[in-house]
Image (cartoon, rainbow, N blue to C red):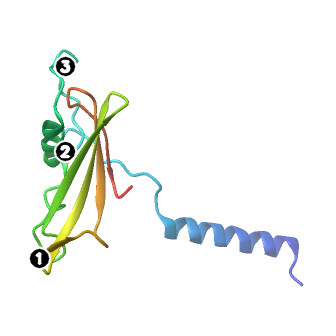
Amino acid sequence: MKTPLARATAASALLVATTLAAGPVLVYRDGAAFCPKDRPPSTPRITAEQAAERAKALMPKAFCGPDWWVDGCDYDPEFALDSWRVYVRQWKLVDGKKQYEPRDHSYVVLDPVGNCLANMPGT
């Protein structure tokens, strides 16, 4: 029979292993290139189309391909709680149809004038 110390050590090792395998819960892209906050509050509010274009500009260059894994991205803006949330989904053209799974996605959250509040990959 294992001692309490051995059981605690095994439980700790299991917790560390599962935490490492799971990876970080939230990762943010930050800095002027990925999440700029350069627009004064007096700037006119942006539209859904402008929010999608702003999100497109904030994605890493290779995120939407084209390459062997991704042919492009869709940008789906939604206005809620006085901010724009833009859902960015990668897709690959397979038999003439967009295939989204198992590709990646990302969220860009913008304030009403287009300042970045968060740029979160694969959330």
Give the structural element (helix, strand or loop) at label 3: loop
Badge 1 amino acid? Gly
Mark 1 and mark 3 residues within 8 Å of each other at the beta carbon = no
What residue is shown at x 47% (from left), y 63% (from top)?
Answer: 23
Label 2 to label 3, Cα distance in Å?
18 Å
- Kind of residue at disc 3: Pro
| Identity of the residue drawn at 16% across and 29% down | 46
**Comes first in the chain, label 1 or label 3:** 3
Name the residue at 50% across, 66% down.
22
Q: Closer to us: mark 2 or mark 1?
A: 1
Residue 94 x/y as whole percent: 16, 79
SS of the residue under disc 1: loop
Please state which of the two labelled residues, at mark 1 or mark 3, is closer to the viewer. Answer: 1
Instruction: Give the Cα distance between marks 2 and 1.
Output: 26 Å
Q: Residues within 10 Å of mark 3 (few under 14, many from 20)?
A: few
Q: Is residue 8 left or right of residue 41?
A: right
Q: Quadrant of residue 64?
A: bottom left
> Which of the 4 image quarters holds residue 83?
top left
Q: Is residue 37 above or below residue 51?
A: above
Residue at mark 2: 55
Image disc number at residue 96? 1
Image depth: mark 2 or mark 3 in front: 2
Q: Residues within 10 Å of mark 1 (few under 14, many from 20)?
A: few
Q: Tag count in the figure?
A: 3
The residue that mark 3 highlights is: 40
Kind of residue at disc 2: Ala
Which comes sooner in the sequence, label 2 or label 1? 2
Residue 55 x/y as whole percent: 19, 44
Reply above or below: 9 against 48. below
* Residue extending farthest bottom: 1
Secondary structure at badge 2 equals helix
